Amino acid sequence: MKKLVLIGLITLAGLIVLAACTPSGGQLYPGGMMGPGMMGPGITDSGGMIGERGGYDPDAEQITIDDAAKAIERYLLAYYGKELVLKEVMDFAWNLYAEVEEEETGIHAMELIIDKYTGQVYPEMGPNMMWNTKYGTMGNYSGSPTADMPVTAEEAEGIAQGFLATNLPGFTVGHADTLYGYYTLHTLTDAQIEGMLSVNGHDGAVWYHNWHGPFIDMKEFHDESENGH
């Protein structure tokens, strides 16, 4: 019983610290509630459908960015036809991340996570599921989804920089990519990518993506200028 009470007090203290760190102008969503493999079925690197992740082969090798890109393209074709195209893949220590855009509009549609060993592709947790008014799976929205939001991209960059100044001094933000309902921005240290965060396009809430681990590499795939976007 004493141990349970102690755990409860520690949890409460952690919540109080998070609340104290919330920057003005936006609510902090620390994320990290759900880990990779908890989003349900996906498509493996070999093209097959799988459900929950099992144990890893200790001799398994990590897939490459190009392997991930092929898995993503199969995923998009299976679920969205040719409506969506791959924009970029980022390699982090804990997973691979991809951003996808609409072929016709050039608007960033969704964010994906790719398992580094199995090649499983699934929607990213956090803002992509909770704030995405067109492609999200957990949000409760009314009306037609739009990327024209009360908080502009420039304002989102300012909010993000204010968040970093309070919570991660010395970090800066890159350009704000516009999605339906929110923006996602790279976070930088010494002009090099460190990670990313998202800013809600309606209320300015900030959600730091803390489930990737250290940044390793990235590759661009779709040139927006091809279609005049």
Image (spheres, helix red, strand yellow):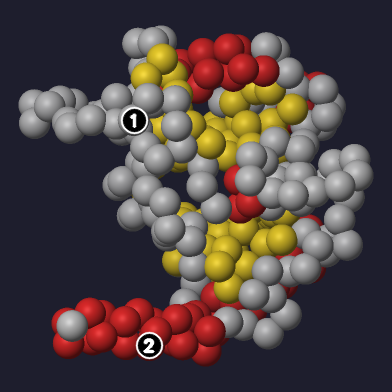
Q: Secondary structure at mark 2?
A: helix
Residue at mark 1 to residue at mark 2: CA–CA distance: 33 Å
Q: Residue 224: which numbered mark, if any?
A: none
Q: Residue at x 53, y 18 (%)?
A: 75
Q: Residue at x 58, y 73 (%)?
A: 28
Residue sitting nearer the eye, 159 or 201: 201
Measured along the vertical axis of the image, is residue 228 above or below residue 137? above
Which residue corresponds to mark 2? 13
Residue 6 horizontal side relative to residue 14, left or right = left
Q: Mark 2 is on which residue type? A: Ala
Q: Earlier in the sequence, mark 1 or mark 2?
A: 2
Say if residue 67 shows up in the picture.
no
Which residue corresponds to mark 1? 52
Q: Secondary structure at mark 1?
A: loop
Measured along the vertical axis of the image, is residue 213 above or below residue 23? above
Residue 161 screen position, x and y as percent: 63, 73
Residue 134 screen position, x and y as percent: 76, 38
Residue sitting nearer the eye, 215 or 5: 5
Residue 17 horizontal side relative to residue 202, left or right = left
